[in-house]
Image: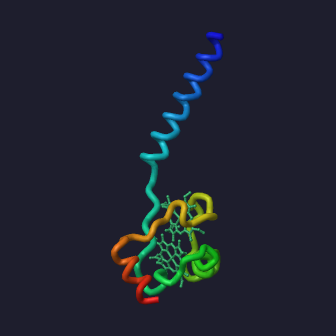
Amino acid sequence: MKSTLTLILSAGAVIAVLFFISSTGKKAPSIPLDKMHHTITIQEGCVTCHAPGKQAPLKDTHPPKEQCFICHKVGNKVMKSINIDLI
Ligand code: HEC
Ligand code: HEC
């Protein structure tokens, strides 16, 4: 039974360390609040410019290139609500 407890505690320690690393890692830049971005709300729209050979390709070092919105948030909530009103 003691080994079960040790396992649980060390699993918890690993999770804590991973959480610490991810919270101090590189922060994804906000999505700019310009004309090119304020109308795009679905991810399919992003890759019309952010793909190899397009207007603004992602760096090779870019982290996983799916689900943009998990990491990239729109820069400013107030501006965002104004933009939504304009659409
Ligand atoms: C009409 C083309 C276009 C579309 C569509 C587009 N982008 Fe962009 N995006 C650009 C350009 C051009 C830049 C500026 C690139 C630069 O400064 O090097 C940029 C910059 C960015 C940046 C800031 C990069 C930095 O270094 O600060 C992020 C984040 C970003 N885009 C995310 C997205 C996401 C997420 C989507 C989909 C919701 C999207 N973009 C859709 C053209 C586009
Ligand atoms: C796992 C989190 C994550 C996801 C998912 C993600 N990004 Fe990023 N993105 C980042 C980080 C972190 C950076 C900063 C990288 C750096 O500074 O080297 C970045 C940088 C960028 C940049 C600046 C230029 C570059 O290549 O560094 C653009 C533009 C961008 N992302 C667009 C997108 C788009 C479009 C998607 C969806 C197709 C996407 N990102 C998905 C985390 C993410």
Q: Residue 26, position in %: x, y?
A: 45, 54
Q: How is the image coloured?
A: rainbow
Residue at 39% from the left image edge and 78% from the top image edge: 81
When the figure is inspected, residue 71 is found, relative to residue 24, above or below; the finding is below
Q: How many marks?
A: 0
Residue closest to the far top: 2
Quarter of the figure that contains the N terminus: top right
- Depth order, front residue of 56/17: 17
Give the quarter of the image for residue 9.
Answer: top right
Q: Residue 59, position in %: x, y?
A: 56, 66
Residue at 43% from the left image edge and 67% from the top image edge: 30
Residue closest to the far left: 78
Give the quarter of the image for residue 57.
Answer: bottom right
Residue closest to the far bottom: 86
When the figure is inspected, residue 44 is found, relative to residue 16, above or below; the finding is below
Residue at 35% from the left image edge and 78% from the top image edge: 79
Q: Residue 22, position in %: x, y?
A: 49, 46
- Depth order, front residue of 51/39: 39
